[in-house]
Image (cartoon, grey):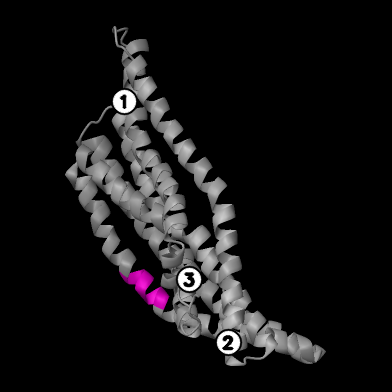
Amino acid sequence: MTILQIVKKFKFSITLVLSFVLLENIAWIIEPTFFGKLLDALIDKFYDKEQINYALPLIIWIFVYLLNVVGGTMHRLLSGKVYAKIYADTASNVIIYSQFKGHPVSKMFARAELAKEYIVFLKERLPEVTWQFSATAGAIIALFFYDWRIAAVAVMVIIPVGVINNIYRKNVMTLQKELHDTREDQYKIFEAGDASRIHEFYHNMVIPQTKIARWSSIDYLVIKVLLMVIFILVLFIAVDVDKFSTGSIYAIVSYIWTFIASTDYVPGLMESLTAVRELNTRLKEEVVC
């Protein structure tokens, strides 16, 4: 069984959930532009005493904000039911196939437990992947309309971020295999009831988890320092060079923060993607009925 087989079998349910995730993300990405326009209208109205109609910018911003709320509410409402059903189906298929192959009971239950990583990926990581790609692309496109140089700076930073994450992925792949190997033996060890082996089992998981955490922290540190430099450059362009309005500066800063915030998910996403790839190799023979 692989993640692609699961997605193919439940494609309509997963697509429905992701459609609301996408609605939430798109509304969130375009919201700063409309709030910036509203902010400029209010400043012109209350400080310059001009006869500015701020009702339309206010209505548009409220509409966009409510789209974000609807998307977020519906995807949270549906995901619980959809992914619980997917796990029930996946776990039962894994156990049925393991019985057919004559695997011991301990291995059957261990693999059913490992299959939860598929659900974690679909329920938590896939929306995060959607958010990261939509936030990154959306922020760059939006910045392009304010100043192409700002967008170009954001594009350039993607290259080193990609290189860093590829190094992270290669190092974590081996560590994920060690974790899965250890977890497959857990029920067998519990059945034996040997306290020393149980103690050894849990301590064997500490080393790869610690190494994964170390790589995750390095990945996070390097990316965040790099983005700090980018943020300073963009602020200089926006404030000192282009002389944007207050609303435009608010929108630009919001898009930069959106771009930076999207990278917060990268270490977790890479770890989850690596775990799913390794799990695909381990369970590829278990075909969904």
Q: Amino acid at mark 1?
A: Lys
User: Mark 2 = which residue?
Assistant: 181
Closest to the observer: 99 or 268?
99
Which region of the structure is painted magenta? 163-169
Point out the tag, 3 or 2, that comes first from the N-terminus.
2
The answer to whether any part of residue 15 appears in the image is: yes
User: Mark 1 = which residue?
Assistant: 37
Identified at 57% across, 76% down, the residue is 93
Say left or right for 228 vs 210: left
Whole-percent x and y of residue 41?
Answer: 32, 18
Q: Is residue 165 magenta?
A: yes
Whole-percent x and y of residue 210?
Answer: 58, 77
Q: Secondary structure at mark 2?
A: helix
Q: Image height check: is 205 above or below 272?
A: below
Q: Image height check: is 216 above or below 134?
A: below
Q: Secondary structure at mark 3?
A: helix
Q: Amino acid at mark 3?
A: Glu
Whole-percent x and y of residue 15?
Answer: 41, 54
User: Mark 3 = which residue?
Assistant: 271
